Amino acid sequence: MLQIGKYQFQSRLFLGTGKFSSLEVQKQAVEASGTEVLTFAVRRMNLENPDQPNFLENLDLNRYTLLPNTAGATTVEEAVRIARLARASNLCDMIKVEVIADTKTLLPDPIATIEATKILVEEGFTVLPYTSDDPVIARELVEAGAHAIMPGGAPIGSGLGLLNPRYLEIIIEESPVPVIIDAGIGSPQDVVQAMELGADGVLLNTAVSGAKDPVKMAEAMKWAVIAGRLGFEAGRIPKKRYASASSPLEGMVK
Amino acid sequence: MIIQLNGKEYQVPPEVKTIEQLVKQLQIKQRVFVIEHNRMILQKEDYPHTSLSHGDVVEIVHFVGGG
């Protein structure tokens, strides 16, 4: 059971809803992933074409918790404005705070992220800030009142996996709130690695939506989260330099 | 009357005087969206009594796919 603020989830996989080839593929992928949390972006409605199908409007909102993001924001003000707009839908009060500092790496602006987190916590949001793998910034976000922290494994959409597992491990060790590894996940092995480090969950999007078969990959990610978590809870063996036989040495037929 | 609607100039038909009427005019009543009027976020119950004036800035946003 994963608890974030007042929310409880069985699934530890959060799924992004961007860049799917069709709404049908997306629907099947969401189903196959077993996720309970879906992220969305807030954008201007296309008023010239108001009949365009919209994924969220076809979702059973009793089954999914919405996690809107502030993607596109580059300042505290923009992030706070997007968060307030999202909450005014009366569909959710969770917000993924994302304030981007650099267009090439899409790395977050740590100072603006901390500031926006403070404001939104104060306003009663359930706040999940997207942050870098810096343990000091993670600590600041916890102090700012974040309900979970979401360090990136690698730049958004890069599929590079966990670039700095040692720092992620420190963040996980030190954080009193859940840690969701967000961004950079490329394949199920990255998910298993994140979960074995002790992450409370992962948030991914492109790894599924950009896979050759997104529905199959969504299912793979579901099992990867489960396998990684069970492995973490079970406790792995220490690594040794030399072999130790699994079969008894006694009683060999000579 | 001309307003800024989602970043573009929009000629408001003469019979449209409130946000409620604008929503009807745009045929989006059944959709999931949020409206910001001159930087103030509106709740649905505000629509009928929020009047439109020349030069108003209106944003109508919704949820799209994103990570």
Image: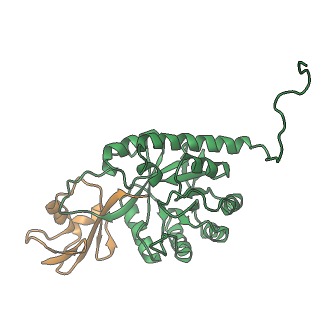
Residue at (54%, 75%) from the top-left corner? A115
- Is residue A42 at least partly visible in the picture? yes
Q: Colour of chain B?
A: orange
Q: Which chain identifier belongs to the green chain?
A: A
Q: How is the image coloured?
A: by chain
- Residue nearest the observer in this picture, A206 or A108: A206
Q: Residue at horizontal 40%, vertical 69%?
A: A72
Q: Is residue A7 above or below residue A220?
A: below
**Image location (x, y in percent) of residue A132:** 58, 67
Percent x, y of residue B65: 36, 56
Horizontal arrangement in the rendering, residue A112 relative to residue A179 (left or right): left
Q: Give the quadrant of residue B35.
A: bottom left
Name the residue at the bottom extreme.
B55
Question: What residue is at 47 percent from the left and 51 percent from the top?
Answer: A207
Q: Is residue B60 above or below residue A226?
A: below
**Residue A179 position within the rendered picture, expressed as x and y whole percent measured from the top left:** 61, 57
Residue A225 percent location from the top left of the image: 58, 44
Residue at 40% of width from left, 68% of height from top?
A82
Badge count = 0
